[in-house]
Image (cartoon, grey):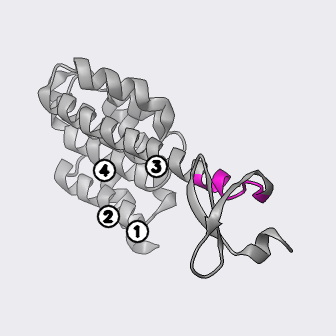
Amino acid sequence: PRSEDALIQMASDENENTIVRSYAISSLSKLKSTRSIEPIRNILNEINERKSKTDQKKYSSLKLYAMSALVALGDSNVLGELIAYAKDDDASVRLRAIQQLADLEDDSIYELIEYKAQRDPDRRVQTQAKKILEQMKKKREEKKKTESNSSNSNQPIENLKIDGKDSDGNLIHSSDYGTDIVPEKKLNP
């Protein structure tokens, strides 16, 4: 707890170098310090309140570390903030935001990622968004397959068409889902 307190203090100290503050936040994330969620949120709020483009640029890496830490620490309020960061002026912030959004695996972000893939002004953000879309599509397909397979295994035996027997005497049946071998005693208890 003492080291955790020291890291929170270091991360929150505006007089501290931004690199040191960033590493302190990263360390808190690796320590799974849920106590640091509120101070990290405060740091983000302070950065967002800065109006100067110079300040925004200066604190860009600190902002990225803070976002990553909140995702890693499971902050439930981070989704809205990440969506806002996906629209940030800084391409690096947008890039990190869409990566963090993908890590949350929330289907509600699909349209935003799709928009970023087609229309973000930065080519790197577009490229990453396209990769994320592909990953999301694969996960959706895998989920559908898993759901489909689990519902197939619950198909009543009486609805199966028997095609014959294999060399061990097991019945071979087919359905819309493929061919299976079922021991005869399972069909005729």
Q: Amino acid at mark 1?
A: Leu
Does residue 75 appear anywhere in the picture?
no
Q: Which residue is the site of mark 4?
A: 13
Q: CA distance from mark 4 to mark 2?
A: 15 Å
Q: Secondary structure at mark 1?
A: loop
Which element is circle 2 on? Answer: helix
Q: Residues within 10 Å of mark 3 (few under 14, many from 20)?
A: few
* Residue that carries the numbered disc 1 in the rendered image: 31
Of callouts 4 and 3, which one flags the residue occurring earlier in the amino acid sequence? Answer: 4
Nearer the camera: disc 4 or disc 2: 2
Residue at mark 3: 142
Q: Nearer the viewer, residue 167 or 146?
A: 167
Res. 27 mark = 2
Image quadrant assignment for residue 20:
bottom left
Residue 95 image offset from top left, x and y in percent:
24, 36
Label 1 and label 4: CA atoms lie apart by 19 Å
